[in-house]
Amino acid sequence: MRRLHDPCPNPDDPDARPAPAPGNLPAELNPFVGREDELAELGGLLEESRLVTVAGVAGVGKTRCVIRVAALREKRYCDGVLLAELSAVRHPDLLEHALIDALGLTDHTSRPPRATLVEHLSERRTLLVIDGFEHLVDACADLVTELLRRAPRLQVLAAGRCPLRVDGERTFPLAPMSDGDAVELFTERVRGVRPGWEPTAGERASVLELCRRLDGIPLALELAAGRLRALSVEQVLLRLDDRFRLLTGGRRGAPPRHQTLRTAIGWSHELCTPEQRLLWARLSVFAGSFDLEAAEYICGGPELPADSVLDVLDELLAQSVVEREDGPTGARYRLLDTVSEYGAQWLAAAGDTPRLRRRHRDWFLGLATWCELDWFSPRQAEVAARIDSELPNLRRAMECSMESPDEVHLAQYLAGTLWFYWAGCGRLSEGRHWLDHVLEEPTPHDAARLKVLWVLGYVAVLQGDAVGAISALQECREEAERSGDATALAYSVHRTGCLAIVTDDLPRAEELLRDALGRYRDVGELNSNVLMAQVELAMAVAFLGDLDAAAAICDEVREVCEDHGERWALAYALYVLAYAALRRGRPARARQMLRECLAIGRTFNDLLGTVLSLELLALVTAVEGDAGEAAVLQGAAEGIWPSVGLRLFGSAFYGRPRAECEEQARRELGNAAYEEGLRAGRRLDPATAVDRALAGGGPAAAMDGRGAGGAPTAGGPRGTRRPAASRMTGRGGPERW
């Protein structure tokens, strides 16, 4: 659209033209706070378009923003800036009369009021601000279109719950306030009831939490600020569970729909069609964001067919009830917490909450099942991103199942099914929480409970909690033997072998892991867990000194990973191959493989794989002659371990590379310089540490195209490969499945 070039003459020049017509913008009764970026963007849009609509949810501050930007640009409009407030106009036939009143016109003739408006505006340079038009959107769109067509110097700045949807319109979705602006607004409004108020050091965190729980909605913040006349910040927080009852008592003189938060949101609700209200209520069962497929399944039904959900959702988007956000998994949608809570009250009033919560739970049980199967595929990164996006909904699904003793087994199924996320995507702590929680209720030792037990044992091993691990794994093994569950028995033996490695009982670890691999073969199990059993066997063999056997096992794992697109287990196989390469005096080869480990770990946010790789890379760096950088990498690893568990599992074998690196670095740097390097590394966040490690070099080494253990590298020539589906060899690698 063409940029507008029609500035008013200099308003300070008395000879230029008569003084601009007076506008009717209301004076600000309290300071306007924040929104600097939004105001600047709106100003830019007004430079480019004759019709700009600010759309947003009730209470988000649309009116204040459009009035503010209009006031800031008032001198640009020779014939005035005029505000038409339409919320009190109940019938479309009165719309034109309301605009005539706003423009201060008097017309006693019998001609149509639209003709009066067109005649008055046709040659004037005017900014018309229209607020609260959503209940008259069709009539308003028709009128604005005609006025813009017949008054070429007119501009319109509109504020409403939805766009007008006419040609030439530029829509500006007004989001809730940022944390900083929200805190500033809340503080400023509290001073209106408690002059001179400043949050104490102890209150600042509570103020921020309050602003976040109110979604940064200015109306909610102002109403909450008014409550500080009688309550403390902490008391307001405690009462927010019923925010609609708490946030009442708006300012005198405010529009009726802004007197309380309930009526502000209710204003939007009243303007929805029955189908829109129904979908709004049903969408309240989601926690966080959701995608279209989930909405269609969960919210569809006889009154709202699944194939109509998209159209109704699109209407709620247009009316700012639902927000869209784009992320790694594509388009997703969400309700602000305040809007969701209002919908939840309507859902409860209809008596439909239990049914919708069960549908929600069932959908996410199915999603988790699909993701577990797809984890062993080229779609691992997609699965990790999907679970990241759906985690709030998965939590809600587990909570729903825990509410009924008859459905606890479903919560157990879900917690166990997410093993790959807890262990592979940096969620050990949360996984431990849910695994412990779903076992609190007594249930039969069925397959779901047995799976939770071995997953709990696995997570406890990775956290360095040997007592918790052996307790869960022993119970799993005993009950699996009693019930004849061969699959659960294989997993319990496997994870007990993993525990033996980190507690430095290597002969027993080798025995248990070979036993587990045989059991996996017998039940036909092939997935990332089976590959990890082979990697762990290779690690035990490497610690016992047989580097050739360890490398051979991991080369076979690498082949299976390449065949299936598996990346997570591949990273751990490369870690063992890097360990073997370093022990054979090939640090450059070790560095190459550890870099790939770190890149894979970053894909999945796998902190355990990341920190193990950093520990070994530190030794590689020291061997290559850069003791200072080695100390920094060790410090970075130190900073990550508290988020994972017991450092290096408390294992002497896993800890040996660190001890060797420290000894060499201290010897070359001296204690003071070494400690300074550690401190520098501890200051790095994990992402920065990984970036630094990936950018690091080390002396170039001649590459002969052979991997650790004589295996060809990915880029080198390859010989004939055995099929990945093969039976166990004596070394633990697959031969035929």
Image (tube, rainbow, N blue to C red):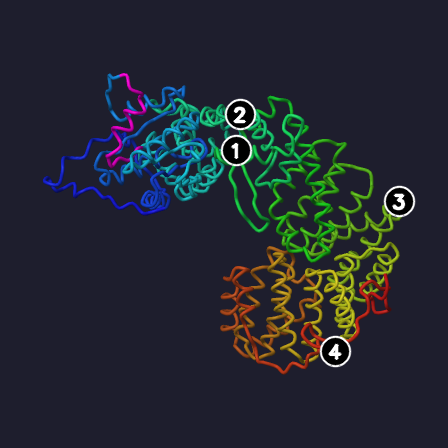
Kind of residue sitting beneath label 3 = Ser
| Disc 3 and disc 1 in contact, CB within 8 angstroms | no
Give how far across and how far down residue 82 sits, in percent: 27, 31
Q: Taking 562 as reference, is 224 above or below it?
A: above
Among the two numbered marks 3 and 2 on one chain, the one whose residue lies closer to the N terminus: 2
Residue 68 pos. (x, y %): 31, 37
Q: Amino acid at mark 4?
A: Gly
Q: Is residue 593 above or below residue 255?
A: below
Name the quadrant containing residue 26: top left
The residues bearing labels 1 and 2 have C-alpha atoms spaced at a distance of: 10 Å
| Residue range highlighted in magenta | 110-128
In the picture, the disc for residue 315 is: 1
The amino acid type of the residue labelled 2 equals: Thr
Amino acid on which disc 1 is placed: Glu
* Location of residue 23 (image quadrant): top left
Foreground tag (3 vs 1): 1
- Label 1 and label 4: CA atoms lie apart by 62 Å
